[in-house]
Image (tube, rainbow, N blue to C red):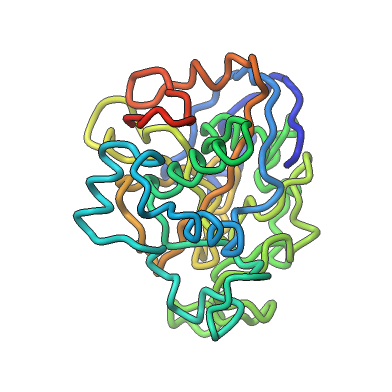
Amino acid sequence: MVEIPAGEFSMGPSKETPEPLLPLRYSARRTVRIEAFEIGRYEITNTEYSAFMRAGGYRDRVYWSEEGWAAKERYGWECPETWRDKRYRTHRDLREDNDPLPVVGVSWYEARAYCRWLSEQTGDRYDLPTEEQWEYAARGKEDYLWPWGNTWDETRCNFGDDLDGDRHPDGGHDEHIYPAPVGFYRQGASPFGCMDMAGNAEEWCLNRYEEQGSWSAYRVLRGGSWLTVSPCNLTTVFRGGTFPWARYIFWGTIGFRVVRIPQGSQTFSKTQVNGQNAPSPLRKGPKD
């Protein structure tokens, strides 16, 4: 985990952001005050997620919200969508140990169930980052367009390096066509030292995409993925989103990282989820 101190930053693109780098959807420019928290330096890996699975995470209803459990039962989820696909695993024999690739092919519901399980195992309070927490961890106070700065550098992240125009990543700039081991692109670290906040796995955030309107059912996605081609969609201000039950859009690119909320902090208890205060993740049978 990386300690993120309390602070204030300007969220969203600045007036100086070049027009070609302004994505169609981005966070509105505003000043945001952030309380101290901790965020994963890396995206959750296959190894880490396999511990949740082996512990009965897909069988124990207590970790799931009502909506999440209903989706799991309806679609018959027993593991991530990509779990048995060798392209998303380090080991072809699907060994569950020492796999540094980010887990992908998980829904928002599964990501939050993992957070509740992790909270119970550790006694700390874990959840998905809010959109504000994620952006602050990705860019700090520097107003960076990408985690490393304001100049695009194709060598600093795992993105869709399509060199022959067939709309398929070629791995021409590195050996990774699909997800890369977390932290592989050391020069792509954010000002706080967070890795892979541009590319690799696209990451779930806690928030709704919008509070009202046609996309209010969506949950926020941030950071772009190994399949994202356009640099503007890999910026720290780009916003994506999809339904919380979605797992395999864009070839199964969606993963997540977690935040740890300090005990006594108001950040966790006041985080808005579906218009209600976020519940405690510890054996409450929460409702999203």
Res. 15 visible in picture: no
Whole-percent x, y for residue 115 in the image = 51, 41
**235 to 123, vertically: above or below:** below
| Front one among 284 and 166 | 284
**In the displayed structure image, the side of residue 58 where residue 198 appears, left or right:** right
Question: 158 and 63: which one is in front?
Answer: 63
In the picture, which quadrant includes the N terminus?
top right
- Which residue is pictured at 57% across the width and 64% down the height? 46
Residue 5 in the image: state x and y as whole percent: 76, 25
**Left-right relation of 77 to 133:** left
* Residue 9 image offset from top left, x and y in percent: 67, 23
Q: Quadrant of residue 278?
A: top left
How far across and how far down the image is residue 202, in percent?
Answer: 51, 54
Q: Is residue 4 left or right of residue 255?
A: right
Q: Is residue 144 above or below residue 82?
A: above
Picture mark count: 0
Name the image quarter holding residue 141.
top right
181 or 218, which is in the foreground? 181
Q: Quadrant of the C terminus?
A: top left
Q: Residue at x 54, y 26 (%)?
A: 29
Residue 4 appearing in the image: yes
Image: 167 above or below 226: below
Q: Residue at x 68, y 77 (%)?
A: 173
Q: What residue is rendered at 79% in x and 60% in y?
A: 186
| 146 relative position to 267: left or right | right
